Amino acid sequence: MAKGRPHQMASSGITARGIGMTFSRRGASTTVLESLDLDIAAGSFVTLLGPSGCGKSTLLKILGGILQPTEGSVHIGESTAADAVARKDIGLVLQRPALLPWKTARENVAMLRDLAKKGTRGDGAADRALELVGLTHAADRLPHELSGGMAQRVSIARALAMDPEILLMDEPFGALDAITRDAMNETLAGIWAATGKTIVFVTHSISEAVFLSDTIHVMASDPGRIVEEVTIALDRPRRAEVLDTSEFLTYSTHLREQLVGPEARV
Ligand SMILES: Nc1ncnc2c1ncn2[C@@H]1O[C@H](COP(=O)(O)OP(=O)(O)OP(=O)(O)O)[C@@H](O)[C@H]1O
Ligand SMILES: [Mg+2]
């Protein structure tokens, strides 16, 4: 477990074994993932880091039970991924927030929960989720009245309102400027510490991965596979100042070498 973690709540780990994914189209087939094994501990913050097209989103969709792999199996705790999805144990946050433009922030956050769970309307879960992402003041705004970072926080709140054990996040901050991104990373680290959820996070950003993660799985392409697992032993809670430490730089340099090769050394 990560150092400085205040408490650990009930959550599930993820086990993936022998995952392969081959897409077939008009007689031609492309193998995107091959022989991939992954163990994600309950309550941990794990990142999939790799170049564009290496299969990160495909793997995340397989872990989330949205896509059925052509080889291998995924278990969430003792259940199959499909059963966990049916129980709403898995929440998904995508790169683009996809909010309904005619609904307020609060209504967007409450919507999925109200659809999924009978009798939840007006139970305050949406407001609690908005508070977790620091948007209480913007609950009544429409999406066009929100900045990109705020809209993304609404989409995180929407997933949190479902109270899933596992949160899968596909480059949720990819479209944000560096300063907003740093702030969002601090917010997310705080939410993770407060809720004890298992988070699987996809990013291209080395610094984002180091800042957030307990463990980083470095991926390579053709076919997509995990080439290295790096444990980040920086103390928690982590603040933006950690980005300037030599320990942080050592991790970043190592990861850049894994992704780009030794010429990346600065
Ligand atoms: N439904 C599909 N049919 C055919 N090929 C697909 C399909 N989905 C993904 N691919 C291919 O699988 C590969 C991996 O795609 P994926 O979206 O998982 O990559 P990624 O690592 O998430 O990339 P990025 O960082 O750009 O989002 C790509 O070559 C893509 O073209
Ligand atoms: Mg992707």
Image (spheres, rainbow, N blue to C red):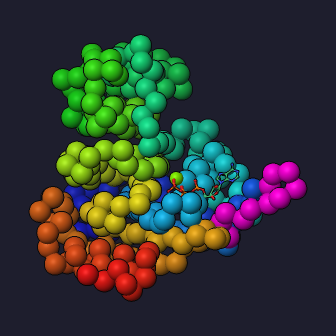
Residue 172 horizontal side relative to residue 228, left or right: left
Q: Residue at left 22%, top 73%?
A: 248
What x and y, as percent, mark residue 77? 55, 57
Residue 102 horizontal side relative to residue 133, left or right: right
Q: Is residue 124 visible?
A: no
Residue 54 quadrant: bottom right
Q: Residue furthest front?
A: 263
Q: Residue at left 75%, top 56%?
A: 23
Residue 240 quadrant: bottom left
What x and y, as percent, mark residue 170? 46, 49
Majority secondary structure of magenta residues: strand
Q: Residue furthest left?
A: 241
Residue 97 horizontal side relative to residue 148, left or right: right
Depth check: 120 or 48 in front?
A: 48
Question: Does 74 appear above or below 123?
Answer: below
Q: Residue at left 54%, top 26%?
A: 116
Question: Does 79 appear above or below 230?
Answer: above
Depth check: 42 or 23 in front?
A: 23
Q: Is residue 25 visible?
A: yes
In the image, is residue 29 part of the stretch drawn in magenta?
A: yes
In the image, is residue 160 part of the stretch drawn in magenta?
A: no
What x and y, as percent, mark residue 102? 41, 13
The residue stretch that appears in magenta: 24-34
Q: Quick one: quadrant of the N terminus?
A: bottom left
Ligand 1, by image quadrant, is: bottom right
